[in-house]
Image (spheres, rainbow, N blue to C red):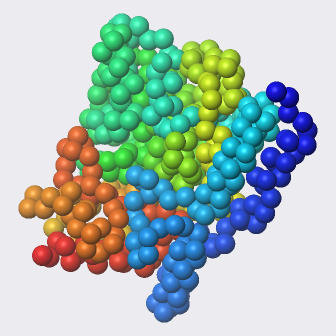
Amino acid sequence: MRTSSADRRQFLQALVGGAAASLVPSVAPNAASAGASSGASAGASAGASAGASAAAEREFLLSDGLTYLNTGTIGPCRRATIDATQRAWATLEANPVAHYGRFAGESLIEDTRTVAARFLGCDLDELMVTTSTTSGMNAIAQGLNLVAGDRVLRTDQEHEGGMHCWQYLARHHGVEVDVAALPRGEHRAKVIVEAIASKLQPRTRVISVSHVLSSTGVRMPIAELSALARSRGMLCVVDGAQSVGAIRVNVRELGCHAYATSGHKWLMGPKGTGLLYIAKEAQATIRPMAFTESYRTYNNSNGVVNLPGIVGLGTAIRYLDDADMTKVEAHNLRLRNRLAEQLGAMPGLTVVSPPAGELASPLLTAELAERFDRTAVAQALLERHRVAIRATHAYYGFNGIRFSLHEFNTNDDVDRGVDALRRELQT
């Protein structure tokens, strides 16, 4: 079947028509907290916060009355992102063959890839579209061709989604996986780098670390760890699930060889989307099977992909790019610091995330006293107070709860979360 140029134009017009205005942020990311940080009155700050909350309610599909402080698990899509995804899906299904692959669909996918490469600070031929951080990490591990006796070094605070690829190589190919312990409460970059360096072996081929630890929100010193890997002739591979969209990320500045992230968390994109960066210098060493033919998303080695979701991901990235990630990060950290200050004075818990500074991130974790059950507390906050947070994973080894604060959150959201937690810990 041949596709006419009219079909292709119709597809493009259907997807982009009316969408341009929705890509411009309707609320400045730092509006809610700017008043408080500049010494404005409490009333003015509350007014700005209320205005931002109302705007957020219009932009998202979150349930009425829900205070959502859990972007680090699943980020909510904006209406503009949902609309772009649904338009792409409806148009595609109207004539699937005409609107997929090397016809109209490919140019839209490549547009998302181009926007994402600029957002991450890399070249287009260093970036791939995937389905998640985990799929990106799997692609890296599968493409490395490690052999029995080769070693990979990770920390003891890695998310299991970024660990399974190395465990698979250990189980089926004899690769050794070493673990560097990162004590909770250790927030000095130099000590973290030294702890990892002390575990390197002659046959260590890869240092695999998270950019932001899912457990405690520590922003790892990736530039220093990348330099360490390079000095030893090793690769530095980064799990960026908790960083891209939450903080400004420039992979070239970080110096890592590979970086995987998700679309469904801090980017607030459609579920089942992700990004994978492989530096040019590492592409001869890391050769993912799915991108053997080309790093282009539509290629014979990758198969059919989620065209509507990828179009939506492009919309989500454009929003944050237009908002300016430097401002988004500053806003997120202001809210995070507000939360840390209030939790620091609360009986029954201890903040285990870093203090304000270079290792802090918008993800903040507190360890509960032994008398509390982290899962029960998180569930009670949701069911009784309509505040969404999450309990930390059991494999992290402590009784923790986690807050993740993004650009749509406000001072009022933080205060509601703190008030709800205080009530639960007093019962």
Q: Residue at x 36, y 7 (%)?
A: 148
The number of numbered badges drawn on the structure is: 0
Residue 220, horizontal then vertical, whole percent: 42, 43
**Does the rendering let one see residue 202?**
no
Q: Residue at x 54, y 80 (%)?
A: 54
In the image, is residue 411 above or below residue 146? below
**Picture quarter containing residue 302?**
top right
Q: Which corner quadrant holds the N terminus?
A: top right
Q: Residue at x 36, y 47 (%)?
A: 214
Q: Which residue is most to the left?
A: 371
User: Relative to the observer, which residue lies in front, 146 or 60?
Assistant: 60
User: Relative to the observer, which residue lies in front, 284 or 298?
Assistant: 298
Residue 211, horizontal then vertical, whole percent: 46, 42
Residue 205, horizontal then vertical, whole percent: 44, 17
In the image, is residue 245 above or below residue 45? above
User: Relative to the observer, which residue lies in front, 305 or 121?
Assistant: 305
Residue 387, horizontal then vertical, whole percent: 34, 70
Q: Which residue is most to the top?
A: 148
Does residue 410 appear left or right of residue 372 in this picture?
right
Q: Which corner quadrant holds the C terminus?
A: bottom left
Q: Residue at x 31, y 26 (%)?
A: 198
In the image, is residue 2 above or below residue 112? above
**Does the rendering let one see residue 130?**
yes
